[in-house]
Amino acid sequence: MKSKWPTGILISLSLALGSGLPPVAAAADDHAHDEGAPVYFDFNPQDVAKYDAVVITVCGLSFQSIPKSIFERIFRAGEADSATETNLLGAAAPDQDELLINAAQKTKLPDTYVEDSVNAMLANSGKHYMVVPLRWDRIISRTAEAEANIQDWLPQVYAAAQANHKPLYVFAHSWGSVMTRHVLAELAAKGSPVHVDKYITLGSPLVPANLAVKEFDQLELGNAKEDYGESVRKPANVTLWTNFWAKRDVFSNAIPAADVNYRVDDDADRYQELLHAAIKALKNPFKALKDLRNLKNFSIWHFAYMLGYHQTFPAINVQLDLDIPNADIAPNAF
């Protein structure tokens, strides 16, 4: 099957997979806009009639705007699953930890990474949907400003979809799910007519299981933090909320308020068991430990919803290839 991904993303992904590190985008930043505006909106209401549905996409934060100290806590929290593994961690070369943390923080996908993935999924599944990206500069300090603009523009897209009798979907990754859930709840509280037929969240930190992510959320959300965590509620203007998460993506979790929670990394469990067995057998345990750390690399899993997961584990002589976008996300989201 011919890939729909831009060449730059594929090259970056290939380099990342070859090194066992998370994907890092090309040096050029794909900002085709003025840097002063936090959100970029490109929508022609007249185009809606040509499609079967409208999908709004919102991407997450740039990892570069997250403090390195947060990455260090996330990476090391709960890393060891056994006493044997704990002992080996103390003896293993610490440089790999630092390498993975630095690579994660330097990860920079184009600002179009979500819309590119959705367009590819729709093309592969033969669906004729209009994708409307609500882009922003992905800097944490711009969250409130981005939310304000999304709240202004979302009703415009809804009005066009409603006028043409087309369903409206919102597809949000990572911090984009935090912003869109808040905006939808605010619109519902104000009595806005906006209604979303399908709300799709991926890698959402709305109900974080990881303590470091939870503290980061509370710090950044300020007075709005009561809207998150276990108290998060499904917006009243959403018909179906489907949440995709991965156990190894520490930014994500199952969300009790969602109608459907779909875990995408189940297939990795067997490989983790094999690596644990290799470590306990003490047959080249450091090689197996390195593979295990790559298997648990949260930054790779955090983008696997869009890029898929492809890793080789030399210690057990196997390769794990998961076409998550087309096998898991597309058939269960749209």
Image: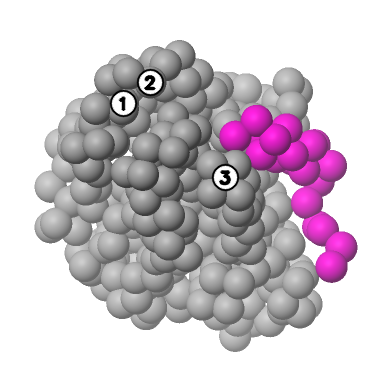
Percent x, y of residue 93: 42, 16
Please say if 290 is above or below 69.
Answer: below
Inspect the image, locate mark 2, and give the three-letter code of the amino acid beneath it: Ala
Badge number at residue 306: none
Residue located at (70% from left, 35% from top): 18
For numbered disc 2, what is the local secondary structure? loop
Q: Which of the two residues, 265 or 270, is positioned nearer the viewer here?
A: 270
Inspect the image, locate mark 3, and give the three-letter code of the amino acid beneath it: Phe
Badge number at residue 92: 2
Percent x, y of residue 295: 47, 44
Cα distance between the residues tagged 2 and 3: 17 Å
**Segment tinted magenta in the rendering:** 1-20
Contact, mark 1 vs mark 2 (Cβ under 8 Å):
yes
Q: Quadrant of residue 136?
A: top right
Q: Is residue 7 magenta?
A: yes
Q: How busy is the neighbourhood of tag 3: few (under 14 within 10 Å), some, or many (20 plus)? A: some
For numbered disc 1, what is the local secondary structure? helix
Inspect the image, locate mark 1, and give the three-letter code of the amino acid beneath it: Leu
Please say if 269 is above or below 206.
Answer: below
Please say if 16 is above or below 191.
Answer: above
Residue position marked by numbered label 1 in the rendering: 89
Cα distance between the residues tagged 1 and 2: 5 Å
Chief SS of the magenta region:
helix
Residue closest to the far bottom: 165
Residue located at (66% from left, 39% from top): 17
Q: How busy is the neighbourhood of tag 1: few (under 14 within 10 Å), some, or many (20 plus)? A: some
Residue position marked by numbered label 3 in the rendering: 313
